[in-house]
Amino acid sequence: MRIANNAGRLVLIDGENLLDVERASGGTFQTDPMAVFSRWAEFSAWAATVDIVNHAEAFALAGANLDAPSPRPRQVFGIGLNYADHAAESGLPLPEKPVVFTKFSSSVAGPDVEVPLPGDTVDWEAELVVVIATGGRHIPVDEAPSHIAGYTVGQDLSERTVQWQDQPPQFSIGKSFENFAPTGPSIVTLDELPHADALAISATIVTIDGEELVMQNGNTDQLVFSVDELISRLSDAVELLPGDLIFTGTPPGVGAGRDPKRFLVAGERLVTEIEGIGKITQHFVNRLA
Ligand code: ZN
């Protein structure tokens, strides 16, 4: 199953077909995409019975205006250095426990947005994002899957100068500018994607001249801490809440790790894709003075 947020309304997606959940369920489920996560078991059971393609009220994806599938999460976690090949490239040892920071939730954006550039060192990080359904504390690793709504594509955009400017460094502000946490296009649930541990993940810059530069081309089989481990370890410290997002880390090829370094400029597009989930695009523009 796939769910998405079409202009503020929760929808089911099957191929090129969308179905409005509130209408199709006769009001059993709300329009607000955030409301579904705390009723996940009930919602999943209902959704499994719906024939989207042949439903009288199904409509075309082409006319949709998709926004972030979890648009107002209360918590957005970022995990640093979570790909073995990225750690090797950085010359850093594998972390013994997850390196965790926050992206403030007002930076969450949809799958196709403009991003004002707050500086000249804005960098990309293609990431698999986990969306939490049922929350909790002290979740055992083997019970983690029952807390997952599904997976979506994310970009952990980062203004590197701001990210590192404090002593000691505090990542959160440099990773929380407007639209710095784009996500989407939909949430793919575990019945369709039970394991996210071997998915191709890439980030491609489309230059002003239309040239396509593949910057990251990795695979989630390089994750140091699996999705289930991240959920377990995070929940040992923090109560996970319905709709929370976990950005699970990025593969090699970020701009700051290149020689010479390469950052995003106005007029460029960034396309991030994960096998079996989909792709998201950002359009970079100059920030108004
Ligand atoms: Zn990241």
Image (cartoon, rainbow, N blue to C red):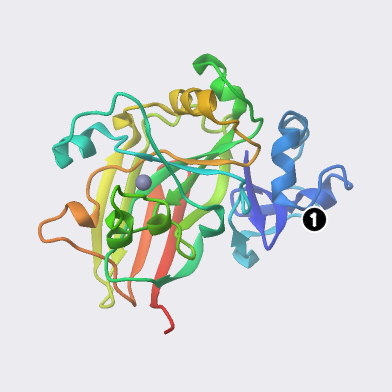
Label 1 Cα neighbours within 10 Å, binned few <14 / some 14-19 / many ≥20: few
Residue nearest the observer in this picture, 213 or 253:
253
Is residue 246 at all visible to an observer of this figure? Answer: yes
Q: Which residue is mark 1?
A: 57
Quadrant for residue 239, please give it.
Answer: top right
Name the residue at the bottom extreme. 289
Residue 29 appears left or right of 197: right
Q: Position of residue 57 (x, y in %)?
A: 80, 55
Q: Residue at x 62, y 54 (%)?
A: 71
* Amino acid type assigned to the residue bearing label 1 in the image: Glu
Residue occupying the point 52% across, 27% down: 237
The number of numbered discs placed on residues in the rendered structure image is 1
Quarter the N terminus occupies: top right
- Give the quarter of the figure containing the C terminus: bottom left
For mark 1, give the secondary structure: loop
Name the residue nearer the viewer: 226 or 106: 106
Q: Residue furthest right?
A: 26
